[in-house]
Amino acid sequence: MINLTAERLPVHRGPAAWSAILPDQPPPERLGGDLAVDVAIVGSGFAGLSAARRLHQIDSKIRIAVLDAGRLAEGASGRNSGFMIDLPHDVSSEDYSGKEMSADQKTIALNRRAIAFARSAVEEYGIDPAFFDPTGKINGAASSKAHALNASYATHLRHLGEASEMLDETAMLEVTGSRHYRSGLYTPGTVMIQPAGYIRAVGAGLRKAGAGVFEGTPVARIARSGQGWALTTPRGTVSAARVILANNGHLESFGFKRGRLMHIFLYASMTADLDRSTLARLGGQPRWGITPSDPMGTTMRRIDTAQGGNRIVTRTGATFLPGMVPSEAALARTARTHRKKFADRFPALAGVPMEYSWAGHLCLTWNGVSVMGELEPGLFAACGCNGLGTVRSTLMGIAVADLVAGSPSDISAHFLAEEEPARLAPPPFAGIGANLYLKWREWQARRE
């Protein structure tokens, strides 16, 4: 008999700032007794909610329960930077380009399917358009080396037939209010989302459509029960014909893919709401998003009052943590780095306080594949975002729902064709090697 016991629950450091800057959520809807459904989904992030929505699209009569240990948008989904990127974005490469032209073209088509799926959710559920802003993004370059990376990426995009525009120093100043950037490469297809606003609203839309979305309901055990599964939670058992594990790196917490998942934590800080005099000193546009030309550089994003206040987000710093628990010391250390990076870009605003600092969990694999498919009869996974949580997780949610509903698609076929995640070096070598590599890459990209 298969009996899977959760070895650990998610541990977060710092607040989920994207949720904290929005109005308070209603009290959590917790599972209050036993429940029978057709499909139980563990995890209410981009993958879990996308799977639930896709199942409802396929057949509105499918009984669905989404179970999460925490609150909507307060796990990893509320801790990313909110970039839904359509173009190749290989975080392990020098300039984000993929390895093959045909593979990049396929990636672009799939990413745009995910963005279209999210856009239709915005329309269907009446989500605030400020939470889904198709404004594009900029690869910022602060050095000659980074500018060369942008030029290389622009050439690659041109060969793919994709639009981009090189911005000079003056244009970057006009956008950001910062003289830090030598140039930037603008690409129009990225959607900038308010991730917590989007996730909260999708969860609310699913509830209105009849799905159960239960917060504060950790799954302690998953066991075979007859032809289906029984999921044990603190206040009741969920009986389900099929189960989807949409819990990203915590797939390993149920015993799957041990030694094959890389648990990376990224760190970010967000300013306090900027007052009028500070905004006047800053200048620039009220909304923009900048990814670094070197993937190990610093991501910056500015938002406005419609998204939770006039604030700037700084994200940099990464650690490999097999135990999935970032330390308070690591968060404090990276928060100091964020203040320095912010001051480098906005010296006139160096005294602006950071109101929030946090860590967010990514799940990568050494060979860049995801884990989407059937692990055991009736037990499925949609995990392994590989640093592209908003788009890749949305795609995995669609793919796994198609499989569960018996309607395999080209999206599910894409993931099923991927290799098995490569095995990592045994501990402690994997951790030592990965963290040394991350520090070296961060040092190389220090100006960025």
Image: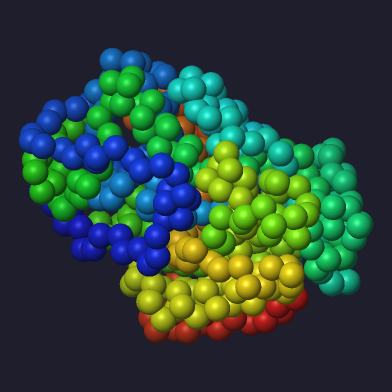
Question: Is residue 69 something that shows in the picture?
Answer: yes
**In this picture, residue 396 sits left or right of residue 162:** left
Residue in the picture at 33% in, 55% down: 251
Name the foreground residue: 49 vs 432.
49
Answer with left or right where residue 136 lies relative to residue 225. right
- Image colouring: rainbow
Tell me the quarter of the image containing the C terminus.
bottom right
Q: Position of residue 288 (x, y in %)?
A: 70, 49
Question: Along the line of sight, which residue is nearer the eye, 45 or 381?
Answer: 45
Residue drawn 43% across and 39% down? Answer: 199
Residue 93 appears at what percent x and percent y? Answer: 69, 63
Image point 80% across, 68% down: which residue?
180
The answer to whether 397 appears left or right of 154 in the picture is left
Q: Farthest front residue?
A: 277
Residue 295 image-quadrant placement: bottom right
Residue 406 shown left or right of residue 334 in the figure: left
Q: Position of residue 154 (x, y in %)?
A: 85, 51
Q: Position of residue 145 (x, y in %)?
A: 85, 72
Depicted 30 relative to depicted 425: above or below: above
Q: Residue at x 25, y 30 (%)?
A: 212
Total marks drawn? 0
Q: Quadrant of residue 297?
A: bottom right
